[in-house]
Image (cartoon, rainbow, N blue to C red):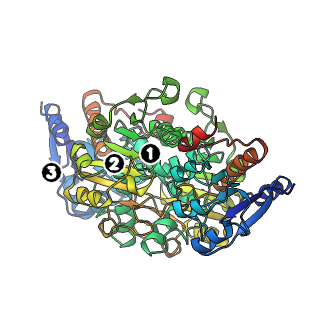
């Protein structure tokens, strides 16, 4: 019997030898197709990928970076696993995949430290008027145009989404003497929450001096931070986002900054990235980073190894290690 | 008997009420001398009975450094110089001691805010945040941001394990760094809290990240010089929130160019506000305009600490926070 084939969408940069080791279990194919239409054709009966079993999926692929319902419809019956490189997998239609019995895994855990590091930097940067200081220095104004800022110590940090990244952030914030409250789909055990206070969404909005978005993007969470939410927040609140841009209504954020409701923001993600709302680009108080949450050699290697671990497990046992919640019912 | 005369050199912004409250034990004046020459004249005139001085970092613009030449002009009544700031290199300690003048500074109140900036600079340098922010603003998204490094698992070498150094350690450990330090003297286990005490040369040779947290004085000027850079690991990252002159800025620029130093984060410069051209041109480095303690909360704490030193001086003839050199000399 021939080996199952595994298709790589994008590139493996830090664990290539480990990828090649999978060739004992599967035929490895590195896809270089440029368009989704051409890609669909390859998955069709008689096409090159018509007996593919699994996909190593990265967002940097040319074709297939977004796996939508149309592409999924073209997949052969043999294709059962999409192993995604990344924590956020909103670019994969997991529900369409599940309807076809296709299970999706992501890479929780390996992203936690690097993302929480960026998140904590953005909190500090927003509170401390870092961007204004950097810009003022470069304009030859030294610190004369940098307004007095605020210390994080004793401020209340409200974490929305207390998964691995949210909990890693709590650990960092407490080293700066911040008090952490959180909202999550469900309260966590005392052990996991580490003493952070669980509150309702509205109570978090009302009490947070600093608000951090650490939740996944899906139909339920799109624009969870909207005009109504801003109205419930404290005056002068600081907002940070390392999750997905679309959990915040970006235009509403610009309005809230203009009114002073939001004192400052630190953002690594944007609704239409790489396009950024001009109101944010024009605002010197905000710290803007180009989605570099896990942009390190060490973390990227950890993530690639984690995808390979999921692939290997799928090939040898039929089970994914880090199956996403929406796929979990397919694997009991 | 009339109340002792206390003179304010510079501005008090946040603790005006506390300053005014000193009038129960002192007569308060605000220095209006326009320059050093006039100040010297006034020291023989209207300030000739001043007992204690509250001085700010910026007041050096009026009086010049508090050096032997100026101290010679002090009235014999002047016994206390209470400085608003942690670093007091604007004051020459020996001539003060010889004249029986106590100097106080602001330890501890500066620790958190300075360590916060220090940690931001370490993260910024390791994670290529400056390149990321600049690339974003140039419309390059993250395409021109090289993959960076995580702090987790890296060895941080702290040069100067005073209050700020220890506050940096606490924060760095929340980001998964291991900490070693060099200090004039080894600290007690309680104070060093698990950090390894090493020689200066060992710190240079083994640290992945080096943080400068030592005072500037005749002994520490250019502690980090070409010879020191030669002993460091290739690709080391350096952070400085102490004083620019503890590092030879021109040698730093060369070390950056050669790649010996991968990146650095600086809040202070040898001749601030002038910055070496080689640093301004380098997009890898994070440069801040000496904002270490520039927050509402910390500025207020510092002003109150100076006022408390003045009160202690007036009521008990001993300041609260005598500078280390004078404590060691045992003369007060």
Residues tagged 2 and 1 counted as in contact (Cβ below 8 A): yes
Q: Nearer the viewer, residue A224 or B67?
A: A224
Identity of the residue furthest to the top in this view: A190
Where does label 1 land, which residue? A215
Image quarter hosting the C terminus of chain A: top right
Quick check: do tags 3 and 1 share a chain?
no
Circle on res. B45? none
The foreground one among B72 and A259 is: A259
Q: Residues within 10 Å of mark 2 (few under 14, many from 20)?
A: some
Disc nearer the start of the sequence (2/1): 1
Q: Residue A217 placed where, x, y %?
A: 44, 50
Residue that mark 3 sits on: B46
Q: Secondary structure at mark 3?
A: loop
Provide residue A47's location: percent of width, then percent of height. Answer: 71, 69
Q: Which residue is mark 2?
A: A224
Crowd rating for badge 1 (residues with CA inside 10 Å; few <14, some 14–19, many 20+): many
Q: Is residue A49 left or right of residue B182?
A: right
Q: Are marks 2 and 3 in contact (CB under 8 Å)?
A: no
């Amino acid at each position: 019997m021939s080996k199952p084939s595994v298709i790589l969408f994008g590139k493996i940069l830090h664990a290539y030898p480990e990828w090649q080791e999978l060739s004992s279990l599967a035929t490895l194919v590195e896809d270089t197709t440029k368009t989704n239409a051409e890609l669909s054709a390859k998955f069709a009966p008689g096409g090159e990928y018509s007996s593919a079993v699994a996909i190593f999926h990265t967002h940097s692929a040319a074709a297939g970076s977004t796996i939508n319902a149309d592409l999924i419809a073209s997949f052969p019956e043999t294709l059962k696993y999409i192993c995604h490189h990344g924590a956020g997998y909103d670019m994969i239609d997991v529900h369409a995949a599940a309807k076809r019995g296709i299970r999706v895994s992501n890479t929780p855990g390996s992203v936690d430290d690097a993302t929480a590091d960026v998140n904590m930097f953005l909190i500090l940067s927003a509170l401390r008027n870092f961007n204004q200081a950097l810009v003022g220095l470069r304009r030859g104004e030294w610190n004369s145009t940098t307004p007095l800022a605020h210390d994080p110590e004793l401020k209340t940090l409200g974490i929305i989404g207390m998964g691995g990244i949210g909990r890693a952030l709590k650990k960092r914030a407490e080293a700066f003497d911040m008090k952490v409250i959180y909202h999550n789909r469900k309260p966590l055990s005392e052990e996991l929450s580490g003493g952070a206070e669980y509150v309702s969404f509205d109570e978090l909005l009302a009490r947070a001096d600093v608000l951090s978005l650490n939740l996944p993007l899906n139909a339920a969470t799109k624009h969870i931070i909207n005009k109504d939410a801003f109205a419930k927040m404290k005056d002068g609140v600081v907002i940070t986002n390392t999750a997905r841009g679309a959990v915040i209504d970006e235009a509403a954020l610009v309005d809230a900054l203009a009114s002073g409701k939001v004192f400052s923001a630190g953002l690594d993600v944007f609704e239409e990235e790489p396009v950024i709302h001009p109101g944010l680009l024009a605002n010197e108080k905000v710290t803007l980073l180009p989605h570099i949450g896990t942009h390190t050699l060490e973390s990227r290697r950890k993530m690639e190894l984690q995808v390979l671990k999921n692939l290997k497990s799928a090939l040898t046992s039929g089970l994914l290690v880090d199956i996403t919640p929406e796929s979990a019912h397919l694997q009991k | 008997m009339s109340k002792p005369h206390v003179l304010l050199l510079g501005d008090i912004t946040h603790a005006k009420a506390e300053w005014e409250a000193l009038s129960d034990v002192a007569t308060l004046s605000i220095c209006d001398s326009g320059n050093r020459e006039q100040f010297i004249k006034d020291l023989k005139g209207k300030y000739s009975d001043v007992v204690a001085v509250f001085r700010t970092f910026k007041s050096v613009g009026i009086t010049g450094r508090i050096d032997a030449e100026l101290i010679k002009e002090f009235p014999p009544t002047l016994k206390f110089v209470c400085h608003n700031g942690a670093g007091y290199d604007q004051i020459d300690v020996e001539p003060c001691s010889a004249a029986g003048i106590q100097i106080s500074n602001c330890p501890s109140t500066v620790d958190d805010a300075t360590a916060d900036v220090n940690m931001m600079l370490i993260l910024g340098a390791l994670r290529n945040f400056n390149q990321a922010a600049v690339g974003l603003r140039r419309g390059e998204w993250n395409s021109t941001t090289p993959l960076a490094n995580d702090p987790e698992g890296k060895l941080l070498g702290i040069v100067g394990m005073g209050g700020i150094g220890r506050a940096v350690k606490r924060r760095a450990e929340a980001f998964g760094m291991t900490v070693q330090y060099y200090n004039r003297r080894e600290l007690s286990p309680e104070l060093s809290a698990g950090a390894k005490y090493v020689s200066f040369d060992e710190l240079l040779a083994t640290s992945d990240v080096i943080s400068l947290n030592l005072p500037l004085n005749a002994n520490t000027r250019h502690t980090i010089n070409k010879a020191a850079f030669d002993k460091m690991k290739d690709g080391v990252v350096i952070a400085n929130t102490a004083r620019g002159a503890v590092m030879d800025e021109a040698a730093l620029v060369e070390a950056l160019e050669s790649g010996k130093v991968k990146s650095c984060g600086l809040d202070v410069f040898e001749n601030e506000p002038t910055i070496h051209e080689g640093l301004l041109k380098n997009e890898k480095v994070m440069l801040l305009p000496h904002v270490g303690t520039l927050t509402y909360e910390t500025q207020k704490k510092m002003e109150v600490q100076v006022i408390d030193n003045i009160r202690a001086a007036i009521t008990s003839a001993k300041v609260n926070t005598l500078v280390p050199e004078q404590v060691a000399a045992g003369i007060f």
